[in-house]
Amino acid sequence: MSTDNNHLYDDLLRACIHKEFELYYQPQVTLADRMVVGVEVLVRWHHPTLGLLYPDAFIPFAEETGLITQLTETIIKMAFAQRALWESQFTQLHFSINISSQDVLSLFLPNLIEELCEQNGMQPSFLTFELTETAVMQELTSSLEVLNRLKMKGFHLSIDDFGTGYSSLAKLYDAPFDELKIDRRFTKDLLANHQAQTIVDICVMLAKALDMTLVAEGIEDEQTFEYLQRYPEIIGQGYWIAKPLSREQFEQWFDSWKRG
């Protein structure tokens, strides 16, 4: 590891201990009636010298160095604390939290998350853990026990970026997932690309057949939102609805969205 990497390792370890992160929340709404049903939790790191860092700048490094488990635990603790604070204000708000393929190789993870739920008075049914399709399928055999434990404890599991990996229906059948997230590359091309429309049609049929929730990411304009409303069962997420928001911004946005 280079000197710079040594410094980054120490910085990231310190950040985990002292919680030098800020969580942002991207709203998810039902397309049929525009109800706010959840948020995807996203992390930013306020580095003391490098400034505001986005996940791409430090998540891969955390995975390479083994710090990802500690980082994930820190983010989950922060998210749970915020969800507890919002309990009276947003009683039905669902939280979606990204976890790494390395996280689901840890047999300690399900019990840890369950304990954190109990400490914060949270119901597991209001929590979804997201993994990318490629990460899931690469580690599916090794991670099935952890995924099944999470599912048995009442948590929801989501396959993120669906359609961009190389999963088979057999693997999808074996995994205990109950949500698919259509990747933004298909959503952004919906209005002009018949193939993208066909892929969304297939995702809708697949989700219905497997009794899974379906989330469409990357809704960037009103026309795409209106197009997707032909599928009332889909939950929407994207910049046209709202960009990732700080805690204060989300509270303001929520009131504004309710007023229409």
Image (cartoon, helix red, strand yellow):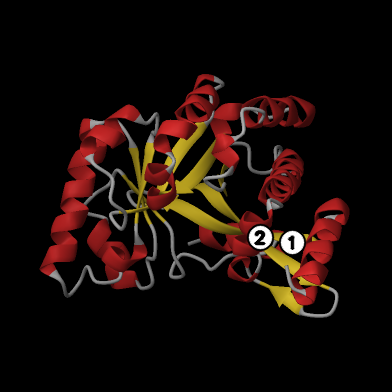
Relative image position of residue 184 (x, y in whole percent): 35, 64
Relative image position of residue 105 (x, y in whole percent): 56, 36
Is residue 20 shown to the viewer in this render? no
Image check: 22 left or right of 237?
right
Q: Does residue 101 sit above or below 18 in this rendering? A: above
Relative image position of residue 147 (x, y in whole percent): 49, 30
Which residue is tagged 1?
22
Q: Secondary structure at mark 1?
A: strand
Q: Residue at (77%, 42%) from the top-left corner?
A: 81
Disc 1 residue type (three-letter): Glu
Q: Nearer the viewer, residue 5 or 148?
A: 5
Q: Residue at (75%, 42%) from the top-left corner?
A: 77
Which quadrant is home to the N terminus? bottom right
Displayed quadrant of residue 46: bottom right
Which residue is tagged 2?
43
Disc 2 residue type (three-letter): Val
Q: Residue at (32%, 64%) from the top-left corner?
A: 225
Displayed quadrant of residue 217: bottom left
